[in-house]
Image (cartoon, rainbow, N blue to C red):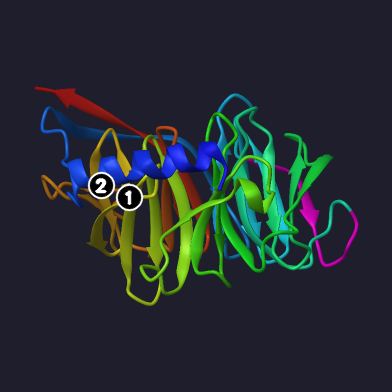
Amino acid sequence: MLKEERVLLALLMVLFILGGCSSIEQRNDYIPVKLNIIQKFDIDFIPQKCVFSYPERTAYIMEGNYIHIFKNGRRINTIGGLGFDHSNFSKLTDIAIAPDGNLLAMDSFQKKIKKFDKDGKWITEFELADFVEPTLFDITNDETFYVYDGNRKEIVTTRTFKENDFYSFGKFQLAKPQSLNLEKNIVLVYDLVEAKTIVFDRLGQFQEELDGKVQFDRRQKYKLEKYFFQHLASDKKFAVTSFQWLDFLIDNGFLILLSNHEIWICTLDYEIK
């Protein structure tokens, strides 16, 4: 075992002993008061995931093996399709925004994460040869990747994608993860089988398990319901509609709501006590 790995494991043990498996407490001095719609646009397909790059005002929407690119609410390009070229996918399973604002896309079959610019032009790709079944991922601002491997049934953190750089967690706690995303200092995994959100800290220590699809913003917890999402501490409802929401994501302060014909990109205003 490398010296760095021994140090990390020792640190994790200290944190576990001192902190235990306590849940993340909500801040009581932040009260959500208003939902601001930054972009709203119609779509003619059923989206699987949407991520948003604010500097470019660009939304990337996953549909099967395709990624649709919308800028300021208008579709400017579609990339992907079945194939092995740089801009094709054999099995597209997840997308995320890189720290530099460009797009990252995981091909589980090819075991690659491909990087594209804001217009959808291929830049480079990362090989995931030491993974067996990479299916979900996200990335931190310091370019540490968190990758869920469906064969290992664990989340692996790495900067090099080499096995000697792996640190893994979550084994025996995850049945069938549908989404994985990082928000500030926590890792959120929605498990489809259990219909629960499992929360870890960035070092992989289990924090809590929450019913339903839950996201965090400023340490406030929000749960997705069919026709709205709800602030758990106050029961306030936002984005109340007559149609059903399929999914939602809070990333870098932006809340993304998906239905089968509309996507909303929003922010929340808060009052501070």
Dot in front, 2 or 1: 2
Label 1: few (<14), some (14–19) or many (≥20) C-alpha neighbours in 10 Å = many
Q: What secondary structure is found at the residue carrying circle 2? A: helix
Check whether the beta carbons of the residues at disc 2 and disc 1 lie within 8 A of each other: yes
Q: Is residue 258 magenta?
A: no
- Residue annotated with mark 2: 16
* Residue 209 screen position, x and y as percent: 25, 60
Q: Is residue 77 magenta?
A: yes
Which residue is found at the position 57% from the left and 65% from the top?
46
Which residue is found at the position 16% from the left and 46% from the top?
236
Label 2: few (<14), some (14–19) or many (≥20) C-alpha neighbours in 10 Å = some
Q: What secondary structure is found at the residue carrying circle 1? A: loop
* Residue 223 screen position, x and y as percent: 27, 55
Q: Left or right: 161 with respect to 6?
A: right
* Residue 191 screen position, x and y as percent: 39, 68
Closer to us: 138 or 28: 138
Closer to us: 256 or 138: 138
Q: Amino acid at mark 1?
A: Gln
Segment tinted magenta in the rendering: 74-85
Instruction: State the residue lying farthest toward the bottom.
Output: 193
Q: Amino acid at mark 2?
A: Phe
* Residue 75 screen position, x and y as percent: 70, 44
Which residue is found at the position 79% from the left and 67% from the top?
90
Q: Is residue 200 visible?
A: yes
- Residue annotated with mark 1: 205
The quadrant in which residue 121 appears is top right
Q: Left or right: 172 with respect to 30?
A: right
Q: Name the quarter where the C terminus is drawn.
A: top left
Alpha carbons under labels 2 and 1: distance apart: 7 Å
